[in-house]
Amino acid sequence: MPPPKLKVGLAGLGRMGKRHAMHFLNRTPRAELVAASTPDDAELGWATQHLEPWGVTPYKSYEKMLDHQGLQAVVVASATSVHVDQALKAIAANKHVLCEKPLSTSVEVVRTPDPSSSPYQASPPQSSLTSAELPDSHDPSSRPHPPAPT
């Protein structure tokens, strides 16, 4: 039995979003692009023509795409101005996130003095490994630490 594929959604279908879409369709055997979102009508038309025939569901709403059945991960390749917002919404929806750079053009946008004050609170993971179940190489205390800056 082949290993299961990661079900991926893509936010943004501009230059980089289209590259990611084609990469997932043609070069990523362990992942399946299942959804894509863009508020832009021209990009949505491109998705309808080039992605929908391959089973990808196009969405005009990013939030509706996050509700796509079985979605496990999101690639944020939208306008930089919404990277932080979209990444945090995906995290709050318990999705894995790959966010194109930069995360923001402002340090203040990504700095949260008190994480509990963030409007995006992730739900507890559905399942997690305990440290006893991880191989020793994944134990942070067994990793060498870089020297402190002088």
Image (cartoon, rainbow, N blue to C red):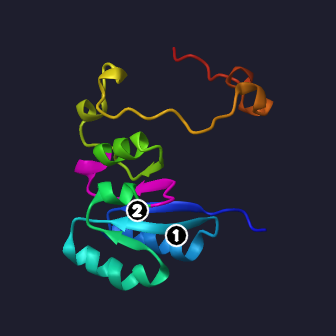
Which quadrant holds residue 109? top left
Quadrant of the rendered image containing residue 105: top left
Give the residue pinned by disc 2.
10
As helix, strand or loop, the secondary structure at mark 1 comes to: helix
Q: Is residue 26 on the magenta stretch?
A: no
- Give me the C-alpha separation between circle 1 and circle 2: 10 Å
What's drawn in magenta, residue-wise? 69-83
Position of residue 61 in the picture relative to residue 135 (left or right): left
Question: Which mark is on residue 114?
Answer: none
> Is 75 left or right of 70, judged from the image as shown?
left
Residue where numbered disc 1 is placed: 24
Identify the mark nearer the N-term, 1 or 2: 2
Q: Where is residue 129 shown, x and y percent of the image?
A: 69, 33
Question: In which quadrant of the rendered image does the N terminus lie?
Answer: bottom right
- The amino acid type, in three-letter code, at marker 1 is Phe
Residue occupying the point 57% across, 39% down: 126
Q: Position of residue 56 (x, y in %)?
A: 44, 74
